[in-house]
Amino acid sequence: MDRTVAIAVDRLCKSYDSHTAVDHLSFQVYAGEIFGLLGPNGAGKSTTLRTLITLLHPTSGSATVLGHDTVRDADRVRALIGYVPQERAIDRFLTGREHLELLGALYHLPKEAATRRINDLLKLVELEAHADRPAKTYSGGMKRKLDIACGLLPDPKILFLDEPTLGLDVQSRLRIWDYVRMLKARGLTVVMTTNYLDEADQLCDRLAIIDQGRIKALGSPTELKVALGGDIVSLTLKEADRIGGLEAALKGQPAIKSVRTTAKGLDIRVESPEKALPVILESANRLGCSVEFIQYNRPRLDDVFIAHTGRRIQDEVQKERDE
Amino acid sequence: MKEYWQEIHALTMRWVRRLSREKFSMLFTLVQPMLFWLIFFGNLFQRAADAQVTQAPNYISFLAAGVVVMTVLNNGLAGGVDLLFDKENGFLERLMSTPIHRSSVILSRFIFVMTITSLQVLVILGVAFLFGVRPATGLAGVAVILLIGMMFGVGLTSISMAMAFSVKSHGDFFSVLGFLSLPMIFLSSALVPLAAMPGWMGFLAQFNPMTWAIDAVRPLILSGWADALPHVAMVVVVMLIFDAVCLYGGAKAFRRAMG
């Protein structure tokens, strides 16, 4: 299918002193899709996003947004995009309406047009009743809604969201997902970063898994899962010392694609469970391994992430928090 | 050009709004300390200060010039604080992702800080007036005082903004600020004329741009045009150089932070 390219990133690199944040990144975002940049903290997602919204200059390589170079035509790009930053970029002393009025002036909207659009947006994000209260009285979810209204004020062709639901409660999160889907339905292109797998899975049409500044995998969530090839049978064994033996016995069997040891058992990638399960159980019986627990999964995005980066995203996030 | 004004106006009004909603903090952090210096310090040292040394009818009239320039100093050095917070909470990034002239944010800050500082200088001169300090050069002299204040303030605000753009954390910013401000005051002619200082302090104080500003403001208050004009001419030259250096440094820091 021939699709209109909204954003083209070509061998993008960004390094700080000796540290390379983004390393030869190339990808395209199509018009009208929700595109996700998925990866742990420090993977280079935010750096990539900030290059696209003209806030960072690439060290080498280039990016174009709707055909305009993000460095040479920065002002053109800025006029076409909306941006919702990661932090709650809210001035606590200004009211919600004043935030939007300020941005209206910065996008050079005439007064009447700005007033009309501001009222529409306040209605859209359900902040009408609170529009004239200082933002310091807002809850986290309300601030996020205001953030999104700010991002939509210029009536952008492309909206950039940096970690849109970071730190939000479940309800606010679902609400934000609804907004994003609605915006897509209105024809907007959405580019977002996230380190939540479920968010990427639920929301994104296509996503790029980024780790250490490089793209590890690119495609729709379904494609990525299918590409892993096969479903997974997870075994938990009673005796840990039998794991090695069972692994050796299963490797190379026709119905089994790959075997990986885990802390208490094995993750076995299989073509179809009907053929593989009898083989697995028969081998376990033969070797005298008592199976404590057996679980069968279609691949999750989690598995895609592990397959491409060698570790779990949650571990990374947790590690960052601990530090 | 019309767009440029729209941006600067909107951004400046944001600072004004913030201030109007932080009335207490404005009162306590900006107006009060300076008035305290003038009222308490000025009256307290009335008899301790030697009129032969200060060359002024009383200490408060001597101190007035110092307090005026101290106000400029403190406001200028704190001028970048709001941008620092904007940088830390992502608001600056939001502003920079809009199609505005990069300089609008900076200019709005200059306009705001200069306006507030001028108003405060007027309040200080007004309070001094209540204590019997009549500026010898009249209203024209007051206008020149404001001009000197603005020229000094531009450089100081640039330093502050450059720091705001360069520091890693706001803890660093406030440490440097606290470290700079008192020595700047003591190593200047704000409290004591240069001639009456210990040699080494007087030596250092003559390199302090604050000294030049005070030495021009003081005769405008105490003696008259004939005495003041040479100092005013000198301070204009000094401040032009000071501002040029600070603006250059500020622009570099800004570009590095925004590149």
Image: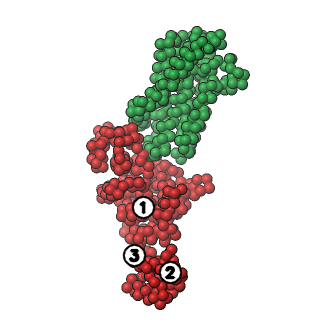
Chain colours: A red, B green
- Inspect the image, locate mark 3, and give the three-letter code of the amino acid beneath it: Asn
Q: Residue at x 53, y 41 (%)?
A: B170
Circle number at residue A239: 2
Q: Horizontal and vertical percent for residue B95? A: 44, 43
Which SS class for mark 2? Answer: loop
Whether labels 2 and 3 belong to a single chain: the reply is yes
Q: Is residue B145 visible?
A: no
Residue named by callout 3: A297
Residue A109 appears in which quarter of the rendering? Answer: top left
Q: Residue at x 51, y 87 (%)?
A: A249
Residue A101 appears in which quarter of the rendering? Answer: top left
Residue named by callout 1: A196
**The C terminus of chain A: image quadrant:** bottom right
Q: Chain of mark 2?
A: A
- Inspect the image, locate mark 1, and give the three-letter code of the amino acid beneath it: Tyr
Residue A230 appears in which quarter of the rendering? Answer: bottom left
Which SS class for mark 1? Answer: loop
- Inspect the image, locate mark 2, and give the three-letter code of the amino acid beneath it: Glu
Marks 1/2: CA distance? 34 Å
Q: Chain of mark 1?
A: A
Q: Earlier in the sequence, mark 1 or mark 3?
A: 1
